[in-house]
Image (cartoon, rainbow, N blue to C red):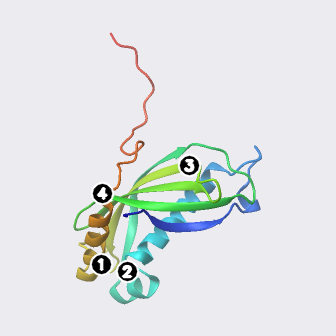
Amino acid sequence: MTTELKVFEGPVSPDWIDYNGHMNDACYVLVFSKSIDDLMVQIGLDEAYRNEHQVSIYTLQSMVHYLQEVSEGEPLRVTAQLLESDAKKLRVYFTMRHGQSGEELAAMETLLLHMDMAAKRAAPFLADTQARVSALQRQHAGLDWPALAGRSIALTRPRC
């Protein structure tokens, strides 16, 4: 059975709690950012590889959905689903769940760009990275499309 990649697991840090008594909105993004770092490792873009080949990943766009409040110490688990990819970009959907109950807490869809750090320009994935991305894309092709993927922000507008 094809499953999403596990990319983060850990408790809500006391430093992440805001004046409302729950995890601050910026800290959800911090956890998702750490999840991007782990995804990079899983597709072969670990620190040694990035340094050797002078490549990295930049975030171009993200959309975060805050679904449930989370309190200090609660366990978190984040998974990643590769929705689309091409020679330079990854469209990834991250789901944050409660580590025990499995309840969905938040989601982030993000567009990532592969960079040549020496040239400071977008660049195609190197062959070994592209092979891992393609393999992951094939693995995730059978997963259900997330209901919140592709959403945009808008206020309801009256019809004329």
Q: CA distance from mark 2 to mark 3?
A: 28 Å
Q: CA distance from mark 4 to mark 2?
A: 23 Å
| Residue linked to disc 1 | 129
| Residue linked to disc 4 | 142
The structure residue drawn at horizontal position 25% and vertical position 77%, both measured from the top left corner, is 131
Q: Splitting the image into 4 quarters, where does residue 2 fall?
A: bottom left
Of the residues shown, which amino acid type is indicated by label 1? Answer: Thr
Q: Nearer the viewer, mark 4 or mark 2?
A: 4
Q: Secondary structure at mark 3?
A: strand
Determine contact: label 3, label 1, CB under 8 Å.
no
Q: Earlier in the sequence, mark 4 or mark 2?
A: 2
Q: Secondary structure at mark 2?
A: loop
| Residue linked to disc 2 | 44
Q: Earlier in the sequence, mark 1 or mark 2?
A: 2
Q: Splitting the image into 4 quarters, where does residue 50 fall?
A: bottom left
Q: Earlier in the sequence, mark 3 or mark 1?
A: 3
Q: Splitting the image into 4 quarters, where does residue 123 fall?
A: bottom left
Quarter the N terminus occupies: bottom left
Q: Nearer the viewer, mark 3 or mark 1?
A: 3
Name the residue nearer the viewer: 49 or 75. Answer: 75
Q: CA distance from mark 3 to mark 1?
A: 30 Å
In the image, residue 33 sits, relative to residue 102, either above or below, namely below
Determine contact: label 1, label 2, CB under 8 Å.
yes
Q: Nearer the viewer, mark 4 or mark 3?
A: 4
Of the residues shown, which amino acid type is indicated by label 4? Answer: Gly
Of the residues shown, which amino acid type is indicated by label 2? Answer: Gly
Left or right: 77, with 79 as reference point: right
Q: CA distance from mark 4 to mark 1?
A: 21 Å
Q: Secondary structure at mark 1?
A: helix
Quarter the C terminus occupies: top left
| Residue linked to disc 3 | 104
Q: Secondary structure at mark 4?
A: loop
